[in-house]
Image (cartoon, helix red, strand yellow):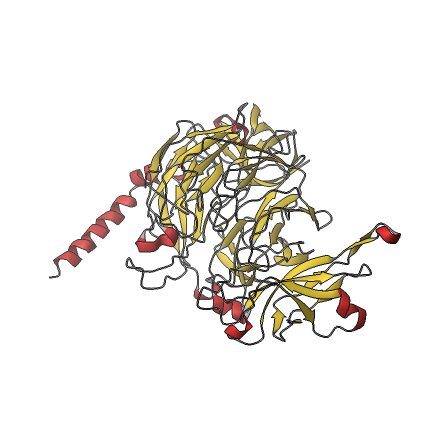
């Protein structure tokens, strides 16, 4: 009776022997699992590499309603080199916000969670969107959270957030004077539970506490109050994380609340912010995109364009933004799914045709293939909209440098249909892909314990060592300065194949050491300037200059929901070699090489990279 157990133990022992042999590691790489001390374990929903080499891991409430209700929001700063950990005070629920690195190395974090979803049957208080109107042109008016709105039948509803209603706008004069009321929305819910508070007809609502002219000029309008399912709701808050003080610093709020937004850095240092669910749980319509100016720390209107939530939007060398079609989670199946090039100057949109399985782009992965000069974006895997069980093994590549950009077929993913795949650019101009699941959120125990490396030069995949931890929803992966890859998070819906036991958030971290680090001596960068200018030339120190074959600047990742639009690898021209040094020249195009902090790697003829040196690229 003990034979199967003995056999299983023997097989596992032999497996460990095989995967730890030098020959195996040199061909497939190696995984190690990191278990953090209990007091530092958090639900890794967001991860960003900072210019200090530390990784900021953001949980916020971590998809845990109990933490949200308790106001317990978490961030962790992890130093992989020293293997040290530090809890960071987290001033708002940044769970499911957006983030990107700014030119000075700070991390902009915008949006997050105002309210958790309530499914059908779980909603106890009738609720809906209240459009608060101000017919007075004299001044804006702010109403605190908890403001009471009273329907004509006397039913009362309270606001769940503070809302500021702009003043009315008066145009013309005399008999031609026109006053357009200012308007802002806020989510409200009935003061008590029960179906009696359901309102199915539009109505005007009085605001409690107002008298005289204010009572006439300020009021609410709502179409319905229902007990229907309520989606997550976003916040307007924005913060910059300072890698020197290791603290969040609040900046001006966005105009619109966002949950599941994408933030993409521009060549001039600004950040375009799109999509998300607002503070009533509705997906933003597309006329609410914003641009953040890190110099003034203010937000301004961006051109109109609708996208599903967490759209993968990349800055291209032309200055236009490429939407690959990849997205994560919310939005109708027939709107905003078409890939294309978006011009912020004239708000034009050029569709990029040819993507196969176009209805299976949700929870797909997209990556700007190395080197960035090639201007090719790869879409990998994906699934159907919402909780669809469908997934695809498709990979397609968009050549954005062509006169008529279009997708062409890439090789199928070796593991078959895959959602939530993470893709990481490596210093040897390949792309490491790992994890994912075949079904929605790993249902039916469908996590794929597979990894592979994509080779752009041959358009093929090669096998990599298998991870031991499944990764699906809420997972991330990023490149470290020493050339390894760290993989975090995963939030399966169920724990068993029958989908009867609730899943739990995966708090173990895995580190993948690529095969190139088992090929013997690696090149060394013993010195490099801390700053370099676009189009400029720098000399870096290395004891074996003739061994340096390539050099590249890799932008640090800022990733969530398998979405990482910031990582890019920009090739540098390798010039003259001298005793102990190599001359490198940077591209001059800020849309190809956006100003900011980068990891500088050099590689030898075998593709083995050095440990990176941090370099600040300036205009």
- Residue located 69% across and 46% down the image: 301
Rendering coords of residue 407 (x, y %)? 46, 30
Q: State the residue at coordinates (44%, 27%).
A: 605
Residue sticking out furthest to the right: 174
Q: Is residue 221 left or right of residue 5?
A: right
Decide which of 65, 19 is in the foreground and name it: 65
- 22 or 70: nearer the viewer: 70
Q: Is residue 573 left or right of residue 496?
A: right
Residue 35 in the image: state x and y as whole percent. 40, 59
Q: Nearer the viewer, residue 569 or 261?
A: 261
Quadrant into which the N terminus falls: bottom left
The front one of 555 and 26 is 555
Question: What is the x, y in percent for residue 270?
Answer: 67, 43
Residue 6: give x, y in percent of width and height. Answer: 16, 57
On screen, 519 above or below 215? Answer: above
Question: Which quadrant of the structure image shows residue 247?
Answer: bottom right
Residue 152 visible in the shown view: yes
């Amino acid at each position: 009776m003990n034979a199967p157990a003995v056999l299983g133990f023997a097989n596992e022992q032999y497996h460990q022997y095989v995967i730890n042999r030098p020959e195996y590691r040199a061909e497939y790489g190696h995984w190690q699992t990191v278990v953090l001390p209990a007091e530092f374990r958090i639900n890794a929903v967001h991860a960003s590499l900072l210019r200090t080499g530390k990784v900021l891991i953001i949980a916020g409430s971590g998809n845990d309603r109990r933490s949200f209700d308790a106001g317990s929001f978490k961030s962790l700063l992890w130093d992989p080199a020293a293997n040290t950990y530090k809890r960071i005070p987290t001033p708002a629920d940044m769970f499911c916000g957006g983030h990107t690195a700014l030119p000075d190395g700070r991390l902009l974090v915008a949006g997050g969670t105002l309210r958790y979803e309530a499914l059908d049957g779980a909603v106890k208080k009738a609720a809906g969107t209240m459009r608060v109107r101000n017919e007075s042109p004299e001044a804006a008016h702010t109403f605190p959270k908890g403001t009471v709105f009273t329907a004509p039948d006397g039913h009362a509803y309270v606001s769940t957030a503070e809302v500021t209603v702009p003043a009315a706008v008066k145009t013309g004069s005399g008999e031609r004077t026109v006053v357009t009321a200012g308007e802002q929305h806020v989510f409200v819910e009935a003061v008590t539970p029960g179906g009696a508070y359901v309102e199915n007809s539009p109505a005007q609502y009085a605001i409690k506490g107002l008298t005289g002219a204010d009572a006439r000029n300020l009021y609410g309008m709502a179409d319905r109050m229902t007990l229907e399912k309520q989606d997550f709701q976003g916040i307007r808050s924005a913060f910059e994380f300072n890698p020197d003080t290791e603290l969040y610093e609040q900046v001006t709020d966005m105009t619109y609340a966002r949950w599941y937004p994408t933030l993409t850095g521009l060549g001039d240092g600004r950040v375009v912010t799109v999509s998300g669910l607002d503070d009533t749980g509705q997906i933003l319509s597309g006329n609410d995109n914003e641009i953040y100016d890190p110099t003034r720390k203010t937000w301004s209107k961006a051109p109109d364009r609708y996208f599903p939530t967490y759209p993968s939007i990349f800055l291209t060398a032309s200055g236009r933004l490429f939407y690959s079609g990849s997205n994560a989670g919310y939005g109708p199946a027939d709107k905003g799914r078409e890939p294309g090039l978006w011009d912020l100057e004239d708000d034009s949109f050029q569709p990029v045709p040819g993507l196969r399985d176009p209805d299976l782009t949700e929870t797909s992965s997209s990556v700007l293939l190395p080197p960035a000069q090639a201007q090719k974006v790869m879409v990998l895997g994906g699934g159907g909209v919402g909780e669809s069980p469908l997934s695809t093994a498709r990979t397609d590549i968009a050549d954005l440098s062509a006169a008529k950009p279009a997708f062409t077929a890439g090789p199928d993913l070796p593991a078959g249909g895959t959602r939530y795949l993470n893709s990481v650019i490596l210093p040897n101009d390949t792309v490491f892909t790992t994890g994912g699941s075949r079904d929605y959120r790993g249902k039916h125990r469908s996590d794929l314990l597979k990894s592979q490396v994509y080779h752009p030069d041959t358009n093929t995949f090669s096998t990599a060592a298998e991870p031991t931890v499944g990764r699906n929803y809420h997972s991330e992966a990023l490149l470290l300065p020493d050339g390894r890859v760290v993989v975090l998070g995963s939030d399966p819906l169920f724990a068993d194949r029958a989908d009867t036991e609730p899943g739990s958030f995966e708090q173990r971290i895995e580190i993948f050491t690529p095969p190139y680090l088992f090929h013997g001596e690696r090149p060394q960068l013993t010195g490099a300037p801390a700053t370099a200018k676009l189009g400029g030339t720098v000399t870096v120190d290395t004891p074996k200059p003739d061994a340096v074959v390539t050099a590249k600047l890799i932008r640090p990742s800022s990733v969530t929901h398998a979405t990482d639009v910031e990582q890019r690898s920009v090739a540098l021209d390798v010039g003259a070699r001298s005793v102990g040094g190599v001359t490198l020249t940077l591209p001059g195009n800020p849309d190809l090489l956006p100003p900011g902090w980068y990891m500088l790697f050099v590689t030898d003829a075998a593709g083995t990279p050095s440990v990176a040196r941090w370099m600040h690229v300036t205009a």
